[in-house]
């Protein structure tokens, strides 16, 4: 394992639930566009692709199984990147609709949003105790590793309780998502606190972090300094620099690769990410 010590896992989240072509013409929306972008990001060195899909008519966030299946099929046929499917594409959906893509497509990872919160002062992002328990067991059944998304500190405590119940199995892998209105803001101080807290109550966990929008680079630099893993992409941030839209998710991958190299680390290959995260569904080929 020692040669994995200086490896940083880089997740790319190319599409997400919200950016539209009006926000940025460069966001990939259809399964073909998204898969093409993921394949390019993999070639540029990304380790994991976190995938959302859109409704083919409205282009809004969706958990449409067919759109996931199409995207995953093209990605798997063309590259070896680790696949991470969201379970939170849209608000107010039935549990079964949220779980179907990972149950059938068996990605190596799926997101696991570990609590309920107000979302950007407009709606409630609902992840009830009953849903989280069911989701944990269903992921175990499918050999899918949950990525525990944490927007606020109470979600770490939820995760610890779910480990005690058996719905989640330690060691856990966390993704700290900072900067969503309704959750914790995207500051290095908040990240330091969360990492310290996870190390106290769930020692042995691995983690990555991201900041939304303008918090993107400060959180990335703080995560790098603490030895965490990283996520980039238009789900979280559409600007390459102030007032300048990124023309492709590849630009974020390339920049992060350079930044990680400057501190003497390298980005983990998909296979290295599989080893670090102990992934079970080797589903790429
Ligand atoms: Zn997501």
Image (tube, rainbow, N blue to C red):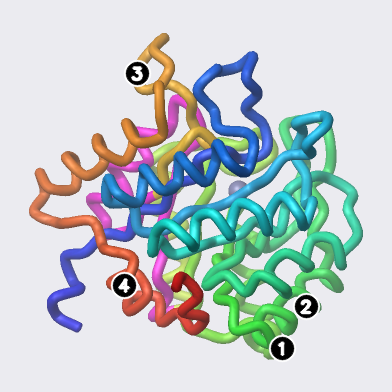
- Where in the figure is residue 66, as x and y percent of width and height? 76, 54
The label nearer to you, 2 versus 3, is 3
Q: Which residue is mark 1?
A: 165
Badge 2 vs badge 1, beta-carbon distance below 8 Å? yes
Chain-order first, disc 1 or disc 3: 1
Identify the image quadrant of the N terminus: bottom left
Callout 2: 10 Å neighbours few (<14), some, many (20+)?
Answer: some
Identify the image quadrant of the C terminus: bottom left
Determine whether the residue tagged by mark 1 lies in a helix, strand or loop.
helix
Q: Is residue 224 magenta?
A: yes
- Where in the figure is residue 80, as x and y percent of width and height? 38, 64
The label nearer to you, 4 versus 1, is 4
Q: CA distance from mark 4 to mark 1?
A: 31 Å
Q: Left of 226 or right of it: where is 111?
A: right
The label nearer to you, 2 versus 1, is 2
Q: Which residue is mark 3?
A: 241
- Where in the figure is residue 236, as x and y percent of width and height? 52, 36
Question: Going 86% across and 73% down the picture, which residue do you hit?
Answer: 130
Q: Quadrant of residue 87?
A: bottom right
Q: CA distance from mark 2 to mark 1?
A: 8 Å
Q: Which residue is mark 2?
A: 133
Callout 3: 10 Å neighbours few (<14), some, many (20+)?
Answer: few
160 or 46, which is in the foreground? 46
105 or 207, which is in the foreground? 105
Determine whether the residue tagged by mark 2 lies in a helix, strand or loop.
helix
261 or 250, which is in the foreground? 250
Badge 2 vs badge 3, beta-carbon distance below 8 Å? no
In the rendered image, is residue 237 in sight?
A: yes
Measured along the vertical axis of the image, is residue 220 above or below residue 99?
A: above
Residue 271: image tag = 4
């Amino acid at each position: 394992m020692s040669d994995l010590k200086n490896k940083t896992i880089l997740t790319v989240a190319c599409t997400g639930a919200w950016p539209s072509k009006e926000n940025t013409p460069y966001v990939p929306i259809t399964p073909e566009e998204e898969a093409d972008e993921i394949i390019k990001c993999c070639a540029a060195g990304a380790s994991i692709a976190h995938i959302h899909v859109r409704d083919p008519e409205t282009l809004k966030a969706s958990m449409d199984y067919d759109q996931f299946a199409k995207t995953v099929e093209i990605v798997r046929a063309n590259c070896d990147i680790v696949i991470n499917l969201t379970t939170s594409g849209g608000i107010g959906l039935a549990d079964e609709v949220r779980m179907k893509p990972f149950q059938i497509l068996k990605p190596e990872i799926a997101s696991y949003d570990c609590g309920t919160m107000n979302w950007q002062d407009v709606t409630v992002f609902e992840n009830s105790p009953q849903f989280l328990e069911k989701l944990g067991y269903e992921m175990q059944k499918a050999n899918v590793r949950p990525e525990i998304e944490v927007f606020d500190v109470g979600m770490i405590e939820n995760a610890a309780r779910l480990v005690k119940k058996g719905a989640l199995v330690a060691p856990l892998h966390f993704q700290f998502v900072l900067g969503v209105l309704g959750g914790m803001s995207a500051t290095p101080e908040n990240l330091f606190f969360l990492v310290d807290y996870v190390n106290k109550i769930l020692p042995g966990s691995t983690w990555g972090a991201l900041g939304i929008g303008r918090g993107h680079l400060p959180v990335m630099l703080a995560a790098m300094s603490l030895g965490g893993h990283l996520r980039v992409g238009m789900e979280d941030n559409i600007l390459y620099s102030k007032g300048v839209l990124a023309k492709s998710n590849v630009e974020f991958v390339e920049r992060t690769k350079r930044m990680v190299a400057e501190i003497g680390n390298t980005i983990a290959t998909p296979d290295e990410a599989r080893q670090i995260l102990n992934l079970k569904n080797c589903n790429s080929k």
